[in-house]
Amino acid sequence: MTDIREVIGTGKRVERHHGWPRFEVDRDGWIRAAETLAEGRLTLAGLWGEKAAIHMAVLAEDGGSAAVLTLACPNLTFPSVGRLHPPAIRLERTVHDLFGLVPEGAPDTRPWLDHGRWGVRFPLGACEPAPADGAPYTFLPVEGDGLHQIPVGPVHAGIIEPGHFRFTANGETVVRLEARLGYVHKGIEGLMQGATLSRAAELAGRVSGDSTVAYALAFARAAEAALGIEAPSRAVMLRALMAELERVANHLGDFGAICNDAAFALMLAHCAVLREQVLRTAEASLGHRMMRDRIVPGGVAVDLEPAGAAAVASLVKEIRAKLPALIDLYDNTASLQDRTVGTGYLKPELARQFGAGGYVGRASGRAFDARRALAYAPYDRLTFEVPALPEGDVNARVWVRIREIEQSLSLLDQILDTMPRGPLRVETAPPGMPVEAAAMVEGFRGDVLVWLRIGADGLVERCHPRDPSWFQWPLLEAVIEGNIVADFPLCNKSFNCSYSGHDL
């Protein structure tokens, strides 16, 4: 078992930080943590900056503990973590883009979110004018006989968000994929600075539209931990009900969409009907199809009336009745199995190294689930399994989704059966002194992290939301190698990484 405190050594604990402990470390402690990540004894959960400091969240999965490490950067530099641990590379590039902090010895210093169109450089740090003509972006070089490149995007034929994919292929076989993202950067972290808690909660719920419940929940839990308050028991159960409805809706959508990308549109039609029923039930029972702005710091903004509870129970019954036929259809259609089995293989060691969350990690044997590993309420008293498979291909990622739908239906039953009566919300008040906290919840795509600092006046001084896609996008580049170009949409859909959540 890895003891985070032993890794940190002489780091000083920050008393006003809640939820997880935060330690201020020196350069040796920072490097020691990076080395421990590289050895696989800790998992990187996030890395973000401030004007003169860098923060890193780490998990000790074997012990179910977590911590935030902070290194002061008076010279605006810090030892690169990415030099030792590749999952940190894109995060360090983002920290430089936003704050101007320089990772010493970093293996990749190209910009990531900054496409030279902001008009300024380092907007959250020592903001300075940007060159008028921007800067060219250089993709990694590829050399070899018979190789050709296929640029795709950033604008795509469907309704997905923008991202550029540069394929290098030998005939039809992909030998390298390099992605460029950042086209939907919204400046969420900048918008949150100085915002009221309620306004920042709204912004958190808009980081990634399909995960609005997960982000709102993570933000609310961080705010409550920082302020030292607890949401009422009924609100806690309502939050879990919304989270499971969001999970079921998205998994049903992905189940159909993956099959559609394998030219089996019938499954998309069936799953789309069920997904629509989930959304309509959410609107009828909770007032919004996506359940946006239903979760707020201190509790929830809406109650579940008896008619709404009956609607959710009826929905669970209907999905449970119809899902087995869809599973049989998927499992007994040879043309589907031909496309999904063995395609887009993600090695278990890569999933572990990158701390891949959600169905991406669990389909490659990494069974981390924040609901179970961190055991936050009400999941600490609900019964559910975390499905994990070793195969690592598109088919495994489909099956993890199927099993998670079944588990979510069971959780919805338990939530409805044990929902207590009582108040929905407790009031929040300015803390009178700066307070901080970190919180992690399990979204449908994987673990969502929010780190938050609230000022004495109750306004947000700094907030960093981290999407699970940060550690999944790089793995998509790995799984497509050796597959044919035509399988990329299938691999991509089986990952279903968030553009918006990543780009912030």
Image (cartoon, grey):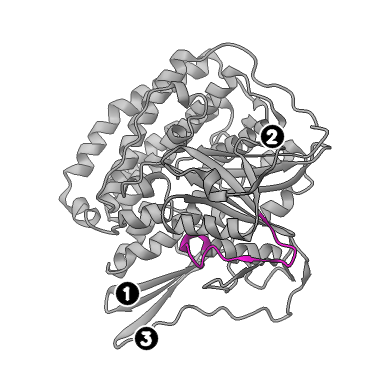
What percent of the width, then of the height, locates residue 73?
71, 62
Instruction: Assess disc 1: are there few (<14), some (14-19) or many (≥20) residues with their C-alpha within 10 Å of its C-alpha.
Output: many
* 293 shown above or below 22: above
Residue 159 in sight from this viewpoint: no
Q: Residue furthest top?
A: 421
Q: Which residue is mark 1?
A: 175
Q: Are marks 3 and 2 in contact (CB under 8 Å)?
A: no
Left or right of 313 in this view: 387: left
Q: Which residue is mark 2?
A: 226
Closer to the chain start, of discs 1 and 3, is 3
Three-letter amino acid code at the position of disc 1: Val
- Please provide percent x and percent y for residue 230: 64, 24
Q: Quadrant of residue 13?
A: top right
Q: Is residue 369 left or right of residue 429?
A: left
Q: Is residue 148 left or right of residue 56?
A: left
| Three-letter amino acid code of the residue under disc 2 | Ala
| Amino acid under disc 3 | Glu
Residue 371, position as x, y percentages in the image: 46, 33
* Quarter of image, res 382: top left
Badge 3, how many Cα within 10 Å: few under 14, some, many 20+? Answer: few
Secondary structure under tag 2 reads helix
Task: Give the residue drawn at x 49%, y 34%.
Answer: 374
Mark with earlier residue (1, 2): 1
Q: Is residue 319 above or below residue 349?
A: above
Q: Which residues are magenta?
A: 71-88
Question: Would residue 75 be counted in the magenta stretch?
Answer: yes
Q: Which residue is mark 3?
A: 143
Is residue 382 visible to the viewer in this orientation of the structure? Answer: yes
Work out whether 458 lies above or below 259.
Answer: above
Which residue is nearer to you in this view: 321 or 376?
Answer: 376
Crowd rating for badge 2 (residues with CA inside 10 Å; few <14, some 14–19, many 20+): many
- Residue 48 magenta-highlighted: no
